[in-house]
Image: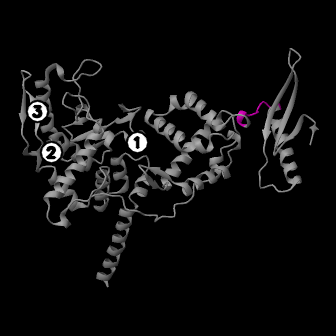
């Protein structure tokens, strides 16, 4: 291979340098566009490789002469990701989303794909990457784990989003993610989400109203004058703080996400109509707790809560107001100097920490189970997000239509609800089948 009309080709090992000459500039210096091309290793014969190089060189020349020469042949995927972050992602993505993307890119994607020229990332490159992740797995706290299908789908979506931007900016001419998918999930298609059944949910609500013994070790204290005194080990019974009772009732009856629940202020509660407005969420970004827009546009919603939950909220509001008055100027204020209006607070009015309900939820289940003798009456150790799943599955079990359930949960599409709660819907389908059979049997 050598010089051709409009471009030249030089072989360098197993790759080829292609140069397009665009004439001279005003200073009489030659204008050239060069690119390095490496043929697909699956091309076995010299004739096949030569044909592939000629095709690539011709297409590259056409792009150059039509002003469509892409930088993807020179720019690595890692370098483009930096540009994508500063020029696009930091202006268009939620802070929590960007933080998550950057973490996944740094830990999983860029170590494997970052060194590739962005134009050299082909569908086969991505399929090999996903298969490699499945084969290797990862370590967490000294335990070897496998990547889930949902994780691979998320990685694919992140890469696709970045590649889509690269196409729009004319860095590459097409998105390889559109021509491949992560490996299929070979596990059981329908899996049951962890949640309480009706009896368990009732016992959990009862658990919120009980008092539990807590033992305090011997320790020193200081009185109001600053004098230290010693307190011996003692045991006392304490109930669950009222605001935590409120939090878990709202989570169960409203199906709110944890961040949506903690972000609530008293302005979001309409006691006249028994409704709560969900219009923001709390999240951790760069180790700092912030309030942001909800997960998506459909997450902004107004839902009705039962009278019992609204009564709890009223009691909590009165109690919190008393606490606020007793704190005086120690109660935290907002940027306008007004007292913080969060429903769930720390001792001085600052917003409750995101981790507080999680630890309290686990502690309540543990303490309740320690008091129950019958193993069949103990509560299952479900994740706290299981309260949201409990809300949805109980509604579905009572034949509430999927659209209504989806609206209460704030899902963008009813298909999301149907996918998550496929197990519960399958049970309803079986129940419908049995109902029809019974109907015709009675008729016969």
Q: Which mark is residue 298?
A: 1
Q: Depth check: give the residue in front, 213 or 80.
A: 213
Under circle 3, the secondary element is strand
Under circle 2, the secondary element is loop
Comes first in the chain, label 3 or label 2: 3
Question: Is residue 160 at all visible to an observer of this figure?
Answer: no
Q: Quadrant of the N terminus?
A: top right
Q: Residue at x 23, y 43 (%)?
A: 247
Q: Main secondary structure of the magenta part?
A: loop
Place of residue 166 in the rendered image (x, y in percent of width and height, measured from the top left): 64, 36
Separation of marks 1 and 3 at Cα, in angstroms:
52 Å
Is 70 included in the stretch rendered in magenta? yes
Q: Are marks 2 and 1 in contact (CB under 8 Å)?
A: no
Comes first in the chain, label 1 or label 3: 3
Place of residue 23 in the rendered image (x, y in percent of width and height, measured from the top left): 89, 24
Place of residue 183 in the rendered image (x, y in percent of width and height, measured from the top left): 57, 58
Q: Which mark is residue 77?
A: none
Rendered position, 303 above or below 198: above
Q: Quadrant of the C terminus?
A: bottom left
The residue identified by callout 2 is 240
| Numbered range of the magenta stretch | 65-72
Q: Residues within 10 Å of mark 3 (few under 14, many from 20)?
A: few
The residue identified by callout 3 is 220
Q: Residues within 10 Å of mark 1 (few under 14, many from 20)?
A: some
> Toward which corner of the image does residue 376 lie, by quadrant?
bottom left
Is 370 included in the stretch rendered in magenta? no
Q: Is residue 307 left or right of residue 85?
A: left
């Amino acid at each position: 291979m050598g010089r051709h009309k409009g471009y030249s080709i030089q072989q360098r090992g197993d790759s080829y340098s292609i140069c397009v000459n665009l004439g001279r500039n005003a200073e009489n210096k030659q204008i050239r566009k060069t690119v390095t091309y490496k043929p697909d290793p699956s091309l076995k014969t010299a004739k096949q490789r030569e044909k592939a190089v000629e095709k690539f060189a011709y297409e590259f020349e056409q792009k150059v002469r039509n002003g469509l020469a892409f930088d993807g042949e020179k720019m690595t995927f890692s370098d483009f990701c930096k540009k994508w972050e500063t020029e696009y992602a930091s202006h268009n993505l939620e802070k929590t989303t960007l933080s998550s993307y950057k973490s996944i890119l740094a830990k999983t994607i860029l170590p494997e794909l970052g060194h590739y020229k962005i134009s050299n990332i082909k569908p086969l490159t991505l399929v090999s990457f996903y298969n490699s992740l499945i084969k290797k797995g990862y370590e967490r706290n000294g335990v070897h784990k496998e990547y889930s299908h949902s994780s691979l789908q998320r990685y694919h979506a992140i890469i696709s989003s970045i590649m889509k931007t690269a196409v729009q900016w004319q860095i590459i001419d097409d998105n390889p993610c559109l021509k491949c998918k992560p490996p299929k999930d070979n596990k059981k298609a329908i899996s049951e989400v962890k949640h309480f059944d009706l009896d368990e949910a009732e016992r959990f609500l009862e658990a919120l109203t009980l008092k539990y013994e807590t033992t305090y070790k011997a320790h020193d204290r200081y009185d109001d004058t600053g004098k230290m005194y010693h307190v011996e080990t003692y045991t006392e019974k304490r109930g669950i703080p009222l605001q935590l009772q409120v939090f878990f009732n709202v989570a169960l009856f409203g199906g709110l996400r944890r961040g949506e629940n903690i972000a609530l202020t008293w302005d979001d509660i309409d006691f006249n109509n028994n409704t709560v407005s969900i219009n923001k969420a709390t999240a951790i970004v760069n180790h700092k707790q912030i309030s942001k827009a909800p997960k998506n546009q459909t997450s902004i919603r107004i839902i009705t809560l039962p009278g019992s939950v609204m009564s709890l909220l009223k009691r909590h509001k009165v109690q919190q107001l008393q606490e606020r008055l007793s704190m005086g100027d120690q109660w935290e204020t907002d940027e306008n100097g007004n007292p913080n209006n969060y429903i769930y607070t720390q001792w001085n009015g600052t917003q409750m920490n995101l981790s507080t309900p999680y630890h309290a939820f686990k502690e309540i289940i543990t303490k309740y189970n320690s008091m129950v003798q019958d193993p069949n009456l103990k509560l299952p150790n479900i994740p706290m997000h299981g309260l949201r799943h409990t809300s949805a599955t109980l509604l579905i079990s009572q034949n509430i239509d999927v659209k209504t359930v989806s609206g209460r949960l704030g899902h963008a599409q009813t298909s999301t609800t149907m996918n998550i709660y496929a197990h519960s819907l399958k049970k309803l389908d079986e129940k419908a089948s049995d109902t029809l059979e019974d109907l015709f049997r009675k008729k016969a």
